[in-house]
Amino acid sequence: MSGLLRRSVVSFVVFAFCFSLIGFTYAVEEKEKTNTVVTVSEMCGGCVKKINKRFEDEKDVAKIDCSIEKKTVTIIPKDGVKLSAKKIWEIMEGISKTPIRLVSPEGTFTSKPK
């Protein structure tokens, strides 16, 4: 293989790799935009159990991630589903975990969404 052809092939492979990496990063960022993150004032192991138990019955929720250290609950919807910020706020209120901040695809809220 000539030097020019070899450089062309290597350049193409590098370009293709970079382009696929950009596409993957974009897909991950788009997926994260569908999540809702709720910050609460207090979080303990009992809170985590209560939150997980309450959300396990929600058909549109794929997964719940609770962080005791950050005092956050990340609600991950099933593919193609948009969760209601108001509904999530009300669910959290219903288990005595009133959010102090809720960040969702609908916006950022420090009071109950309308």
Image: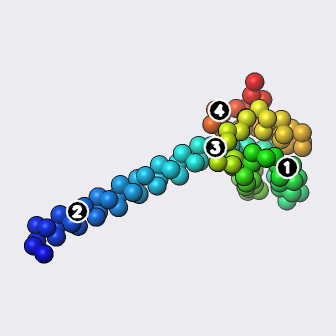
Image quadrant occupied by the C terminus: top right
The mark nearer the N terminus, 4 or 3, is 3
The mark nearer the N terminus, 1 or 4, is 1
Circle 1 sits on which residue?
A: 57
Q: Give the distance between the C-alpha atoms of the residues marked 2 and 1, in whole angstroms.
A: 51 Å
Image quadrant occupied by the N terminus: bottom left
Residue 19 vs residue 36, the one in the foreground:
19
Q: Give the distance between the C-alpha atoms of the residues marked 3 and 1, in whole angstroms.
A: 18 Å
Asked if the residue under mark 4 is in contact with the one under mark 2, i.e. CB atoms within 8 Å, the reply is no
Circle 3 sits on which residue?
A: 80
Helix, strand or loop for disc 1? loop
Image position, residue 70 (x, y; %): 71, 52
Image position, residue 67 (x, y; %): 73, 56
Helix, strand or loop for disc 3? loop
Instruction: Between label 3 and label 2, give the one nearer the viewer.
Output: 3
- Using residue 11 as the reference point, say whether residue 73 is left or right of it: right
The mark nearer the N terminus, 2 or 4, is 2
* Image position of 39 with respect to 16: above or below: above
Q: Residue furthest top?
A: 114
- Using residue 30 as the reference point, say whether residue 59 is left or right of it: right
Circle 4 sits on which residue?
A: 106
Circle 2 sits on which residue?
A: 11
Residue type at mark 2 is Ser
Residue type at mark 1 is Asp
Instruction: Between label 2 and label 4, give the one nearer the viewer.
Output: 2
The residue at 17%/67% (across/down) is 7
